[in-house]
Image (cartoon, helix red, strand yellow):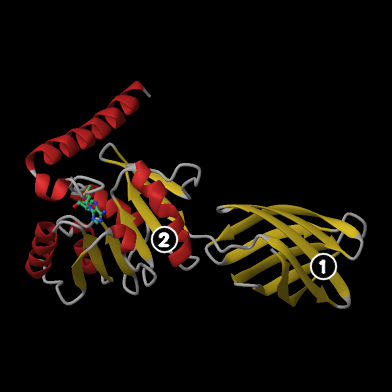
């Protein structure tokens, strides 16, 4: 445990030290930069792409892309993507590295401010910034990204938004999140003439669910939202009917199926819930 703390600290100290050295030596760009240029070790790049399961079909955006290594490694796995960096020298270097790696048709590097970037097409966002920069970026991530979009950050967390996964590689932290659908509020649906009302409270990917059928309260277990997928189990304590709900949330609709088990019989019904109050 002591070793862990010492290594984490020294990694952070190195990061801050390079920020001051850069600020002193490169006044032209450093004054505008929110984060200095320090590259992610290749082993950590691979760990980031592994935890986010990056592959063909993905579009990866690295915010503060440095020499382009993360987007280039993603392209080598069959993804497309682009990087954004405020420093034009880094943008030129990244484009040259993409040519050398033979992936220049799959990637682009754009000069710009990461806070102003259009990131809406990303399936994966990668970050190696500071904690306070992650926190400033968080509202933009929730505004622009579709539920299910994956985010990976090297060394810096998102504060109160706990990671869905956390791995260590080469003494570095790698944090992974999935943008959850917003399912807060009251939802209603009917099956076989029975009216269900569901009240959902949500704190990022953590949800609590209260469910009633007619005027009876059901007992709910294992509520979860992962990207746009919603699931939970419920039981009617009076008639011992058990329910397994699984569906996709899309704006003010949740659409999927419910398994209803009574004794030894299970049947499947469609589950179409409508948002009534947020
Ligand atoms: C720690 S480096 C990370 C480089 C690369 N993502 C990696 O992991 O190897 C941070 C990068 O962010 C860039 N940067 C800093 N502030 C920025 C901003 N406001 N907009 C865009 N890029 C920025 C810096 O120029 C630098 O290349």
Between 26 and 154, which is closer to the camera in this rendering?
26
Residue 98 occupies which quadrant of the picture? bottom left
What is the crowding at mark 2: few (fewer than 14 residues within 10 Å), some, or many (at least 20)? many
Q: Which mark is residue 130?
A: none
Q: Which residue is mark 2?
A: 150
Between 153 and 102, which is closer to the camera in this rendering?
153
Is 6 displayed left or right of 212 in the figure? left
- Give whichever of discs 1 and 2 has the lower sequence position: 2
Q: Residue furthest top?
A: 2
Quarter containing the N terminus:
top left
Residue 88 occupies which quadrant of the picture? bottom left
Q: Which residue is mark 1?
A: 196
> Which x, y percent locates residue 246?
65, 67
Is 6 displayed left or right of 251 in the figure? left
* Residue sitting at x 59%, y 59%: 225
- For residue 125, above or below residue 176: below
* Residue sitting at x 18%, y 48%: 39
Q: Give the structural element (helix, strand or loop) at label 2.
A: strand
* Residue sitting at x 21%, y 74%: 106
> Which x, y percent locates residue 130?
31, 43
> Which x, y percent locates residue 176?
41, 51
- Mark 1 beta carbon near ligand 1 (under 8 Å): no
Disc 1/disc 2 C-alpha distance (Å):
32 Å
Quarter containing the C terminus:
bottom right
């Amino acid at each position: 445990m002591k070793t862990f703390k010492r290594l984490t600290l020294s990694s952070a100290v190195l990061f801050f030290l390079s920020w001051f050295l850069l600020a002193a030596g490169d006044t032209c760009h450093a004054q505008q930069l929110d984060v200095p240029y320090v590259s992610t070790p290749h082993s950590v790049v691979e760990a980031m792409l592994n935890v986010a399961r990056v592959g063909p079909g993905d579009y990866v955006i690295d915010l503060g892309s440095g020499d382009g290594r993360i987007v280039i490694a993603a392209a080598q796995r069959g993804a497309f993507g682009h990087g954004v960096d405020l420093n034009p020298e880094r943008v030129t270097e990244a484009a040259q590295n993409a040519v050398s790696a033979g992936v220049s048709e799959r990637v682009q590097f754009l000069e710009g401010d990461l806070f102003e970037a259009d990131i809406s097409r990303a399936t994966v966002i990668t970050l190696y910034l500071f904690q306070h920069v992650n926190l400033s970026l968080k509202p933009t991530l929730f505004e622009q990204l579709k539920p299910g979009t994956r985010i990976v950050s090297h060394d810096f967390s998102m504060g109160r938004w706990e990671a869905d996964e956390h791995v260590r590689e080469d003494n570095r932290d790698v944090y992974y999140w999935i943008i959850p659908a917003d399912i807060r509020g009251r939802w209603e649906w009917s099956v076989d003439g029975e009216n269900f009302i569901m009240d959902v409270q949500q704190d990022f990917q953590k949800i609590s669910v209260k469910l009633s059928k007619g005027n009876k309260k059901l007992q709910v277990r294992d509520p979860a939202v992962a990207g746009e997928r919603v699931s939970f189990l419920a039981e009617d304590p009076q008639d011992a009917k058990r329910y397994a709900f699984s569906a996709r949330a899309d704006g003010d609709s949740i659409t999927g199926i419910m398994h209803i088990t009574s004794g030894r019989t299970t049947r499947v019904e469609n589950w179409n819930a409508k948002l009534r109050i947020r």
